[in-house]
Image: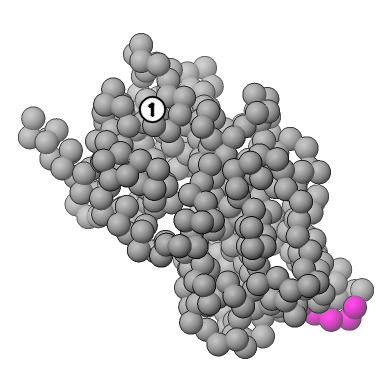
Amino acid sequence: MTRLPSPATLTILESSADPVRPVPDTRHLDFLGRMPIPLRRAFKAGLDRTVADHRAATGVNLDCSFLSGAEWYKPFDALATANEEHLPGMLVTTFHHDILAPGLLARYAPGPSARQPNFHPACTAAGLPDPEGVFRLFAAIPFVFLVDEKRLKGRPAPRAWDDLLDPIWTDDIVFGGWRPNGQVPYQDYNSYLLLSLRREYGDDGLAAFAVNVRHLQHNIRTATQAGSNSRDVGAIAILPWLQAELSPRRERIRVVWPEDGALTMPIGYLVKPEAETRLWQLADYVSGVELGRTLVRNCYPPSNPAIPGAFPAGAKLKWPGWDYARTHDLATESKRAADKFFTAWNEAHEVRECG
């Protein structure tokens, strides 16, 4: 595999959520978007330039709203039941159950003037492009392993996802989550990871994984502590590729891209058929070279095959798939996965504490 630039050369654009702002009124919006925190400032800057260029060329000002901070889920969580006139012309979002309602997707089904982007072979091989062309992929969030060589203690480093189910890793894995203290349930956690593990390995596999998890904590905290002697990290961390590459103790840690594929969350856009011609500059921006280069620098690889250096050589991707997404209620399935995981995780910790 090719080696990325050292962590010092990567662009960290934002490390914490912006303040809460009023939730925008979606009526008559041309654009509604959200992106992962590290990309928000750069994405917004490019979006603003694109809107300004459009205004200069056409005299028309596009009405755009880009979400940040605690408004992440609003108003996306209301779109599935919104009236037609309340739906923006274009949506940009990570893959999430709040945009997968069949009725909502039908409103954004591509018309005859729709332009479908080209895709990197790694994305195509993993089935990330939507076969119905509604969710138009332009980037990805890969999750990889960050391994502490000292903590391995003679055990072979994990090479694939099913290695994480092996009891040799009991209490030695950390992944993303947050809670204010140890007496309350986790308020936030990587539900996509739990959904995907249950999809592939079933309830028993998810329970085996839960036994191996030490605890959950913020990805930035884990990246900062990895390779140290902190009790808050173990031998293995599951992190977005960006955070894994930014972890500083390179003499002791290494990034492992799973041989069966980095678990990948797609980032894409949806456009109403009648808005295709009017909003083509916005679509060109999100799938174009300017944003693509920023995505490469920050380890959120663009799917545009014309942008070099997006993925390590030979890298594979994996995810639950569009067949699964369109035949399951992902909100319900995510909750089921979380319930199974936390039940097994709590039981394992009670046993360890009593033992």
Residue 48 image offset from top left, x and y in percent: 75, 66
- Residue 102 or residue 22, whichever sits in front: 102
Residue 201 image offset from top left, x and y in percent: 35, 41
Residue 96 image offset from top left, x and y in percent: 50, 61
Q: Is residue 59 magenta?
A: yes
Residue 157 in sight: yes
Which quarter of the picture shows residue 153? top left
Q: Dot 1, how many residues are within 10 Å of its Cα: few (below 14), some (14-19), or many (20+)?
A: some
Residue positioned most to the left: 354
Magenta: main secondary structure: loop
Residue 65 in sight: no
Residue positioned most to the right: 57
Q: Is residue 86 magenta?
A: no
Which quarter of the picture shows residue 202? top left
Q: Which residues are magenta?
A: 58-62
Position of 99 relative to 273 (above/below): above
Location of the N terminus (image quadrant):
top right
Position of 15 relative to 68 (above/below): above
Which quarter of the picture shows residue 148? top left
Q: What secondary structure is marked by label 1?
A: helix
Q: Amino acid at mark 1?
A: Asp
| Residue occupying the point 32% across, 52% down | 337
Left or right: where does residue 311 sit relative to residue 285? left
The residue under label 1 is: 163
| Residue occupying the point 38% across, 27% down | 163
Left or right: where does residue 48 sit relative to residue 137? right
Residue positioned most to the top: 154
Residue 131 image offset from top left, x and y in percent: 64, 58
